[in-house]
Amino acid sequence: RTFGTQDAILSGAARATVGLSWEELRASQTVHRTLAELATAGAPLVGGVLVADGANRTAVASFEFPARPVDLSDRDYIQALRAGAPRAVGEVVESRPLGWRVFPVARPAPSRPGDTGPPGTVISSFSPAPFEEFYSAVVENQGDIVALMRSDGAVLARYPPVSAGEGARLRPALSPLMEARQGPARRVFLSTSPVDGQRRLYAIRELAEWPVVVAYGLNMDALH
């Protein structure tokens, strides 16, 4: 449901930009207010909504007006879209320019009138904290884990939580777990956690339209 909400936010933000040039977008308080309303409607999960131009610089944003032209070209979700992905989920980062801890979701922006360059990007962002708070409330046993991960193993939100930046660094260690999920017969399986060395019974569910999986790891001690 939360990713469905983000789809709606991205679509709403994209519609608000239709027919406007990049110069008009940068000067539009109306679009800024629309993005701010979308961000408010999605709170507390949504951190901010913005549109980046074809040069990957922020053109309009929910959180400030006018938006500072922050360069986002090094972000992994930008690179995924440039490689042809229809939508992308970024790893957990400190957002620019405000320093919020978020993981972005993004899709290509509509083309600008008369613009033959790259289409730009519509971006929203999740705050991991509400996910982590929810996961802490649903674990059944001490030692269980719940994690929201990208399909390449990058941790987006987890209980117990990981420190800022650690989710991306865990990606190589989590690759055996991600490989084990392949095939319908392996959606529930035993595995030793590469994070803490504990053996757990895992159940994994993939989101149909996003490169994201949710994993629950049941502490084997609870079964004895």
Image (cartoon, rainbow, N blue to C red):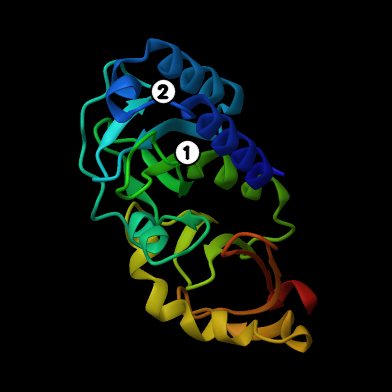
Q: Determine the residue positioned at 21% across, 26% down.
A: 68
The image shows residue 160 at horizontal and vertical percentages of 52, 56
Q: Could you give the CA–CA distance between mark 1 and mark 2, rounded to whole angstroms? A: 10 Å
> Residue tagged by mark 2?
62
Do the residues bearing badges 1 and 2 touch, measured as CB atoms within 8 Å?
Answer: no
Q: Determine the residue positioned at 64% across, 50% down.
A: 135
Q: Dot 1: few (<14), some (14–19), or many (≥20) neighbours within 10 Å?
A: many
The image shows residue 64 at horizontal and vertical percentages of 32, 18
Q: Secondary structure at mark 2?
A: loop
Q: Determine the residue positioned at 60% across, 22% down.
A: 41
> Residue tagged by mark 1?
124
Q: Secondary structure at mark 1?
A: strand
Q: Residue furthest front?
A: 114
Q: Amino acid at mark 2?
A: Ser
Q: Determine the residue positioned at 65% across, 38% down.
A: 5
Please state, as top left, top right, bottom left or bottom right, where the C terminus lies in the image: bottom right
The image shows residue 107 at horizontal and vertical percentages of 49, 49
Can you say whether 146 is above or below 53 in the image?
Answer: below
Closer to the chain start, of discs 1 and 2, is 2
Can you say whether 160 is above or below 43 in the image?
Answer: below
Instruction: Please give left or right for residue 84 compared with residue 117 in the image.
Output: right
Q: Nearer the viewer, residue 133 or 208?
A: 208
Q: Nearer the viewer, residue 134 or 213?
A: 213
Instruction: Please give left or right for residue 52 compared with residue 178 in the image.
Output: left
Q: Dot 2: few (<14), some (14–19), or many (≥20) neighbours within 10 Å?
A: many
Can you say whether 130 is above or below 182 in the image?
Answer: above
